[in-house]
Structures are given as C-alpha cells and as structure tokens.
Amino acid sequence: MSNPEKFPLSDTDEKPDTLHREYTLGQDGVKSPQHQGDYSGARKKTDPVEIRLVRKLDTWIMPTLWLMYWLNYLDRNAIALARLNDLEEDLNLSSSEYQTCVSILFVGYLLGQVPSNMLITRVRPSWYMSGCMALWAVVSALTALAKDFKGLLLVRFFLGVTGALYMLSIFYTRKEIATRISILYTGNILATAFAGLIAAGIFHGMDNLAGISGWQWLFILQGAVTFLIAVLSIFTLPDDPLVTRWLTEEERTLAHERIVADTVGARHQTSTFSGLKEAARDPKIWLFAFMQHMHLAANGFKNFFPTAVETLGFSTTITLVLTCPPYLIAGLISVVWSWSSGRFNERTWHITFAKAIAIFGFILGCATLNTGARYFAMVVFAIGTYAVNSIVLGWVSSTCGQTKEKKASSLAIVNTIANASFVWTPVYDGHVLECCVLACLCGQCVGNEDVAYSGE
C-alpha cells in the first residue's frame, strides 16, 4: 500500500466511500491512487474496465452531441449563405441591418448562458437539451417567414444551444475532455464546411420551387431535420453518471468515482447560486474569460467567410464549394492538436503555437492580392483559430470544477463573456487586422494564465 502522505488531498475534499480497484485507502482514511499521476495529478487510464466504460460513453454521448452541434451551427450559419441567394434584396436589408441580424443571435445566447447552465444542474439534462434543440429548430424554420428586418431580427434572437460542455465535463477527465470538446466542435467546423455545399444544392435545385426562394427552403429543411434529431436525442443523452439509463450499476459507480478522483478540490453538491458565487469569486475564471473572448474575437471571420471567399472572383457555386476545404482541414488538425494537449497535459504552448499560426495566416491574407496565396491564407488562419477553442474550455473544466454547480457556472461565465465578442466584431471594418491583434492579446493572456496556475 502506498504512503498516503505522498498524495494528500485538500481539507475540502469529500470523496465517496465506494472504492474502485485503482485506488487505495490510507490509514487516515484518505483515498490515494496506486499510480502517481503527472505534476497536476492527472493520470492515464490503465484499467480495462475503465477503458471499456469510456468507449461506451463515447458511443452514446459523442454522436448525439456532435449532431446537435452540427445542426445548430448549420442553422446559425445559414444566414451567411442566404445572403448569397438575395436575402438582403428580398427583405430590403441594408448592410448594417444584416450585420445586426448576425450579432443579435449572440445577444440571446449570452443572456441565456448562465441561467441555463445553472438550471441544467437541477433538471434532467437529456430532456432539457432536447427541448432546447426542438425550440431552436422551430425558430430556424420560422426564419423562412421573415418579411423584413424586424422579423429576421426576432427569430435570430432565439437561436442557440447550451449545456453540451457541462455534460462532457461530468463524464470525462481532464486528459480526455479537450479531445472530446474538439470532436464536438468539429460539428461547428464541418457545419461551416458543408453548409456551402448543402446551400449550393438547395439554391440550384429548389430556388423558386412552389414560389419559395432558395434561402427560404434552406431554413425550412434544416429546421425540419433539426427537430427530428431533437426528438431522438431524448433517448440517447445521459443525465448524470449515477443515473444514466444505459450504464450498469458498476459502470455508474465507476463513472462517478473517476470524475471525483480527477477533480481538484472536489466537494459535495451545493446550491446553484452558491456555485455561481464561487465561480464569480475565482480570479482564474475572469482570466479564462478574457482569454477566450480574445480568441473568439479573432474567430469572428466565420460570419463573413463566404463573402470573403467571394472576393476571390469565382461564381456563387464555386464560392460555396471553396468554403469547404479550409474547415475540413482545420477540423482534422484541431482534433489531433487537442489530443496532443490532453496526452501531455500541456496547454500553454499548444495555445500559443496555434495562435502564432493564425497570426501568420491573417498577415499573409493582408499582404498579397494573389488568388492562390489569399486562399492558402484562409486555410492557415482557420487552422490556427479552431485549434485553440477546445483546449481553453477543457482547461476551465479541469481547474474550476470543485462542485458540479461551480463547474456549470464557470463554463457559462466563460462562454458568455467569450461569445460577447461576436456581438461587436461584425460592426468593425478591417476584420483581418483586428483578428491579428486580438490573436496576439490571446497569446499574451495564455502566458499570464500559465504563471498564475503554476503559482497555485
């Protein structure tokens, strides 16, 4: 039996009494791992039972959440593609009104983030997230009925998905979560990639079918598919490790134990408002929030990416096709990059190097008028920006989740402040230069966070 004093837990730790074979109990009652983890206490999976459990979690959770994210971002990004099919002309929108409709989505998303993540700790996540998905499906389809600026503004306000990151955080350890978040966010990336191809097919084959414009068919069909997936997700999404219907009793206990053992300073459940107050008082949260805000501000190019590609001078169909490869490449690399971050339990240099690549892409895009070089620059800055997101959010989950309530509130606060960048970035001109500067700020913030975290 290992010396329990080699692996002391904080005085606030309250671990469950049930033990799993990978842990031993010291003479003073303190639970200690049989195999020492790395500098932060994170450990590799070695037990075949735990490995099978994680594979089962992946089989049930990841496809459903991925589909939800894919459809959500497909619905979100439809407005950028509809712009190429005369949306602005049909609704008599000015350029500033279009930009406002892009931004208003994030206002509704921001207002709902914290209350939603507080609520999800007190209800069944499977029902709550599925219900939210069904509602946004209806809202997306209703976009086709918009007749003017006010109508489009209203329906855009209610699009959004919350709770997915919290669900991942209560089932996956710190070495696992960045890769899962990255896979989840490929739904975002691939939605943006394939949205152009889907829109090209709909615009070409269904424009003015039954007197309905192609951009209207785009919203109607995507809304219908989203609603169907929302109904099916009720039966596949889990609620909590200890009450998940498709896990055995042994698997439920193990799923709960391994997250408690992996959580720094884990404590018993508290009230939702106590969790919110704990998160708000944690200085690391605000540094994470600022860092993610700067990162997503640099990522704001995605709302105008089809328009940027259009400036290369190709036809509408070719433009839509060309929006796909940068996101496919970025999605693949982001998963590998996040896996590397989790494998080595290292975040600072993974984030810094990725942001340096993004900066290079933005500078290259500004420095040349050559069509091939500009398209290459678009691929490069897409890779650099999308490689970062899941690593930052995984960092939040692993360092600010002493209780489920604090973890949910921490993720909500960071996401709320981060996504606020999408409200103001569309109204600025010269996006590429600003993205470059904001990427630099994000890199500097990573260095500050590393110093603060190392000093704890």
Image: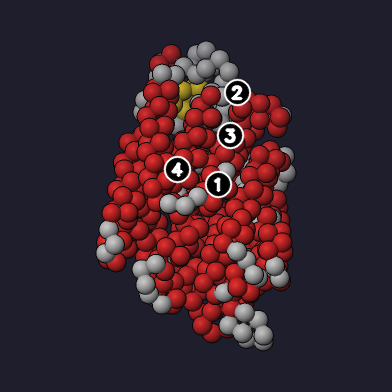
Residue lying at 42% horizontally and 63% vertically, measured from the top left? 308
Q: Nearer the viewer, residue 167 or 319?
A: 319
Q: Is residue 361 above or below residue 32?
A: below
| CB-based contact (under 8 Å), mark 3 and mark 1 | no
Q: Closer to us: mark 2 or mark 1? A: 1
The label number, if any, that marks residue 295 in the structure image: 4
Q: Closer to us: mark 4 or mark 2? A: 4
Q: Which badge, 3 or 2, comes first in the chain's sequence?
A: 2
Q: In which quarter of the image is residue 443?
A: top left
Q: Nearer the viewer, residue 118 or 63?
A: 118
Q: Which badge, 4 or 3, comes first in the chain's sequence?
A: 4
As helix, strand or loop, the secondary structure at mark 4 comes to: helix
The label number, if any, that marks residue 410 in the structure image: 3
Q: Which badge, 1 or 4, comes first in the chain's sequence?
A: 4
Q: Closer to us: mark 4 or mark 3? A: 4
Residue 280 x %, y %? 61, 27
Residue lying at 59% horizontally and 53% vertically, measured from the top left? 103
Q: Mark 1 points at which residue?
A: 424
As helix, strand or loop, the secondary structure at mark 3 comes to: helix
